[in-house]
Structure formats: C-alpha cells, structure tokens
Image (tube, grey):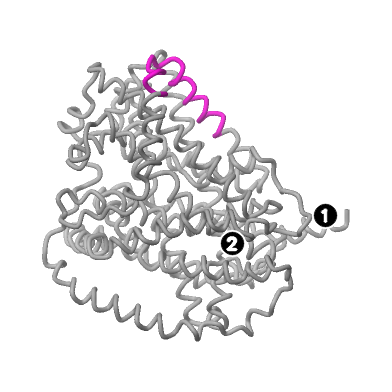
Amino acid sequence: MNKSKQSAKNQTKPQSQNIDWMITLLPLVLIIGLCILFFCLPEQSNVVLGKIRFLFGDTFGVYYLIIGLGIFLISIYVACSRYGTIVLGAPDEKPKFSFFAWGSMMFTAGLAADILFYSFSEWILYASDPHIAELGSIQDWASVYPIFHWSLIPWGFYLVLAVAFGFMLHVRKRDRQKYSEACRPILGKYTDGILGRLIDLLAVFALLAGTATTFSLATPLMASVIGELFHVELNRTVVTIIILVLTCVVYTYSLLHGFKGISFLAKSCIYLFFGLLAYVFLFGGETKYIIETGFSAIGRVAQNFFQLATYTDPQRTTSFPQTWTIFYWAYWMVWCVATPFFIGNISRGRTVRQTIFGGYLFGCGSTIISFIILGNYSLGQQIAGVADYVAMYQKNGDLYSIIIAIIRTLPCAPLILALLFITMVAFYATSFDSIALIGACYSYHKLGENESPHKLIELMWCVLLIALPIALVFSDSSMSNLQSVSIIAAFPIAAVIVLITFSFLKDAKKVSAGNREIIPDKKQDSFHHLELPCFFVLLYFIRIFHYSLDTLHAPSQFPARLS
C-alpha cells in the first residue's frame, strides 16, 4: 500500500527544475521558422525542398531500402534467438496489460486515421502508375503494394526499436527516456556530450515535423464526410480546424487520465474499426472477391517479398520505388521517434519474442485486414465494371470525393459515413495521446520508470501537436513543404535507428548470458572502435553528396503522390 502511494506520488510530483527546455523548444522554434519561411516564400521554398527531397530519394534511395530490409531481418533474428527470452522487466514479472488492451494501444499508437484513408484509396494510386502495367494487370498487383508498404518492414521499424527502448526502460532502468540514451552501449560517454544532444534535437524535430503533417491527408476526408452527411457546402478550412480542435480535446482528456484513459480510448477505437470492416465485409456484396483477391495478394507479397524490398528501378523507367517505397520507409522512420517508445513502455512484463511476434500479429494483421477488406471492396467494383474509380482519379485527382462515392455504394451509407468519421477521430486521438505522452517524457533531463511528466507539460505537448497543423492548414504548399522536411529528416534518423539496434544487441547480449547487472554506462567508452569505419562512411557520403549536387539544378522528377 505504501509502495502504491509512493508510486502515485512520484507520478504526480512536479519536476519543473528537471525540464530540458532546449530539447523541447529549439526544434519547435526551428519548425515555426520553417513555417514562416514557407508562408513568406512559398514557391521558392517548395522548389528548393522538392530538389533536396529528390536528391535524398534518388541518390540515396538504396540507403533507405537496405535499412528497411535489414531492420526487418534483425527483428526476426532477435525474436528467434536467445535474445527473445529476455523479459522486459524483472525475470518473473507478468505483463502490465492484457493482450487485447496491449495490442489495441500498440495498433492505434502506430497508425493514425491515414490507415482508413489509404485502405479505401491506395490501390487507385497504384493502378494509375505505369509500373503496375509493367508487372501485369491491376487485378494482380494493385492490391499487393498496399499490403507490402504497410506491413512487415514498417512494423519491423516499430518493434525492433520498441524492444530496445523497453529493454532500456524496464531492464536497465535508465532514467533518461530519450533516443540518445538507447545509444549509450555503443556511444558510451559521448551520449552525454554534443553527439547525444544532437541525436535528441534531431529526434524531437522529426517528431514535430512528422506529426504536424499527419492530419494533412485524412482531415479533408473528414470534412467531406461532414458535408455529405448534412448536405451543405462548408468551407473545408473551417471544418478542418473544428475537427482538429475536437480531436485535440479528445486526446488531451485521454492523456490527462493516464494509461487508463489511453487504454479505454484505444479499445473503443478498435471496436469501431473492426465494426466498420465487418460491415463492409458482410454487407458490401463483395465478400467472395475480397477473400479471394486478399488471399492472392498475401501470396504475391510472400512470394516476391525480397524482390519488392530491393527493387530500385536503376534505369528510372517509372521511378516507382523512389516515389513510393523509399518515401514510405522514410516516413515510417520519422514516426519511429515516438511510437516505439510507447510500445516499449506498455510492453513491460512481456518477453522480447512476445513483443515482436505479438506486434506483428496484432499490428500487421489488423493493417492487412483493413487493406484487404476496404481496398478490395472498391477494387472489386472496378474490375466488375460497376464503377471506374481509376478514370475518376485520372480526371479530377480528388481521392476524397472518390472515397465518398465508394461509401455511397454501401447499404445505409449515411450510417457508414458517420461511423467512418467517429473512427477517424478515435484513431487520431489514440495516436496523438501516446505521442504527446512520449513528447512530454522527452522534455525531462531524467524521468524514472515510475514517474510521469507533470500534467502541465503533457497539456503543453497536446497543444503543440495540434497548433502546427492548425497553422499550416491555411496553406497547402506549406503542408507539402513540411512533409518534405520530415522525409529529409529521416536520412539521419535512419542512421540513429541502426545505432540503437546494435546498441541493444550489444547490451542485451550480457543479459541473455545471465548477467542483469547494470553496468555504470557513463564510464563506458566503446565508441572508439567505430571511429575509423564511421570516418570512411562519412567520406563516402560526402563524396556521393558532392557528386550529386548537380541534381539540385535539375527539376524534381518525382510525381506527386496526391493531387
């Protein structure tokens, strides 16, 4: 009882003197500065950022692909090896949450409302791409790439980092819940120096940039749903801001009620999500087609996985991997700043193997089911000639109106539109309450395992995460620019992800051998043996970068993902 009271006391104790204001505010100031620049010089900034984005995606594309495939393979190795038996906590500790509650929080934290937007429409984007014509028919390949781009490799990023952070928090009991701390087994004393600060600044910058643009895709759909439900022409900007504020209120309320509130909202979101999927599956009239096409798509992904993961289009006949695969891996890397911390936090008491395989089962499984049901429902109508959604997209480029048209074909369409809207709000809320929690933890120099950020700090992060999207919603070009910034930020983040992965393997090796003693990390200096290889790697990238600067004088060749 006394222990419980003390724990509760620790969780509510103000720690204002321990707040790391530089890590909290400097990235925010930089992003606000970029926003001002985008507003003042929209055309110029768009051109420059487009060229830089092209440089990273075209010249360094293989870099992203190698890390993506490598992290996935490492996740399987870790789960199946002796590392998989390590408990994220005390050796005899039981899981903190039930499997359903844990899986619900993990899935909703890892994916925002974008999952619903893309589940309905992503196959249309692929069907319009010339690369699909090179491979074969729309029937065979349009449903394959959504599963590939949203399943194993993306969740591999999440889960490898989740076990690394869970190990750091629950086994090593480290009191710095930051990216740099996870690198300590390799960086040693350099973790507390400029290098560690740079890693943390980069992480928070990527977090703010990535989350600030997440609303750009799905909120217009939500605004369109409101207009369709009430049969009124509304200003999309005004409706979007109202939706953002509503979502902020929901996830702020959830966060301020702690993990109990987050868990409740996550489980509610899951019920709404699978309720929507069940309705489309059972009553949409495409049940047989959904099952058979989905089964075939899974088979094609399994059969061609390594080919899909390593395809680079060397001759740039379509630039498909640069436009899609590399883009996705970069964007998932940016999101890895917050989500794995949250997954690692809630995975206390589970083994590394349970966390990885359970994450793949719940996270990947739910994602695949969503794309199979919602995507193949409309694809079935396309193939049967009931509607020509590809032609509609090629004519007006408006995916939001197409999704509304798809839903109109369902029985009781207004009910489904309302359910879709509520589910999207719930998805956004459950994503951002976990991100705000991790952001609040990042604001402290030190934060013990049984301590929680001050409520005012949590509230500040709730406001910060919504303020930038509200500010940027007035300018489409600014939103696009900031999205490019987040993708570019993934380039150094990818190197940090690799560093965290190998730091975990090095540190976990001691535990797997039966030694759970916490070694005084600050006395470690294990970075020296990496200086020479890092030097040569740096020279290599400098040479490539110097060689590829000429591309900045050429127009970007990446086609737009969305009109």
Name the front one of labels 1 and 2. 2
**Residue at horizontal 36 percent and vertical 57 percent from the top:** 330
Would residue 31 be found to the left or right of residue 455 on screen? left
Up-down relation of residue 551 to residue 247 (above or below): below
Residue neighbourhood size for the residue with mark 2, other residues' Cα within 10 Å, grouped as few (<14), some (14–19), many (≥20): many
Q: Where is residue 444 in the image (x, y as percent from the top left)?
A: 60, 68
Q: Position of residue 480 (x, y in %)?
A: 27, 52
Q: Give the range drawn in magenta.
A: 269-291
Residue corresponding to mark 2: 165
**Residue at horizontal 44 percent and vertical 85 percent from the top:** 531
Q: Which of 178 and 491 is in front in this view?
A: 491
Q: Nearer the viewer, residue 339 or 502?
A: 502
Q: Where is residue 265 in the image (x, y as percent from the top left)?
A: 59, 38
Asked if the stretch drawn in magenta spans residue 284, the answer is yes
Label 2: which secondary element: helix
Q: Where is residue 18 in the image (x, y as percent from the top left)?
A: 63, 72
